[in-house]
């Protein structure tokens, strides 16, 4: 199954590295593709019978500071700040 997420706060390869690494930790995820220019994350999973996986992925993205467009709560500053930390960690990992 393939899931697409239009996300906020993605800036560079560091962000992409973190998103890929963290989403690949989710059980059932086979591949993660990140399109920085279009703010798009595509996740390919092993099967289509896990009804909760999209919600799990969406929550994980939000916790990393990359919420799905239109789903930000009242604290936009915190999600942006969290994304900078995630980005920095992704740059340090040096996987791009």
Image: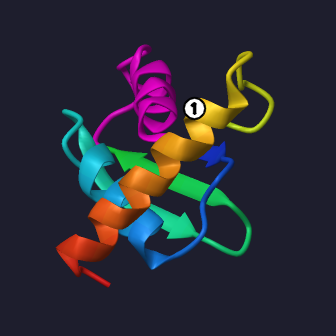
Evaluate whether residue 66 shows in this view. no
Q: In this view, does 30 lie above or below 69?
A: below
- In x, y percent, where is residue 79? 58, 35
Residue 75 appears at what percent x and percent y? 68, 22
Magenta segment: does it hold 27?
A: no
**SS at mark 1?**
helix
Question: From the viewer's perspective, is 30 left or right of 63?
Answer: left
> Is residue 29 visible in this depiction of the protein?
yes
Q: Nearer the viewer, residue 92 or 37?
A: 92
Q: What stretch is highlighted in magenta?
A: 46-67
The residue positioned 64% from the left and 53% from the top of the image is: 9
Q: Specify the quadrant of the image occupied by residue 67.
A: top right
In which quarter of the view is residue 32 placed? bottom left
Image quarter hosting the N terminus: top left
Q: Is residue 62 magenta?
A: yes
Residue lying at 47% horizontally and 38% vertically, measured from the top left: 61
Residue behind mark 1:
78
> How far across and down, in percent of the image, does residue 49 sit?
37, 20
**Image-based side of 1 in relation to 92, left or right:** right
How dense is the environment of label 1, judged by Cα within 10 Å: few (below 14), some, or many (20 and up)?
few
How are the residues colored? rainbow
- Residue at (28% x, 61% y) in the render: 89
């Amino acid at each position: 199954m393939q899931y697409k997420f239009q996300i906020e706060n993605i800036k560079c390869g560091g962000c992409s590295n973190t998103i890929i690494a963290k989403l690949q930790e989710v059980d059932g995820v086979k591949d993660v593709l990140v399109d920085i220019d279009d703010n798009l994350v595509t996740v390919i999973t092993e099967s289509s019978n896990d009804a909760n996986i999209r919600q799990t992925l969406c929550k994980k993205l939000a916790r990393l500071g990359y919420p799905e467009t239109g789903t930000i709560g009242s604290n936009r500053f915190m999600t942006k700040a969290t994304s900078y930390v995630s980005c920095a960690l992704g740059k340090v990992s040096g996987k791009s």
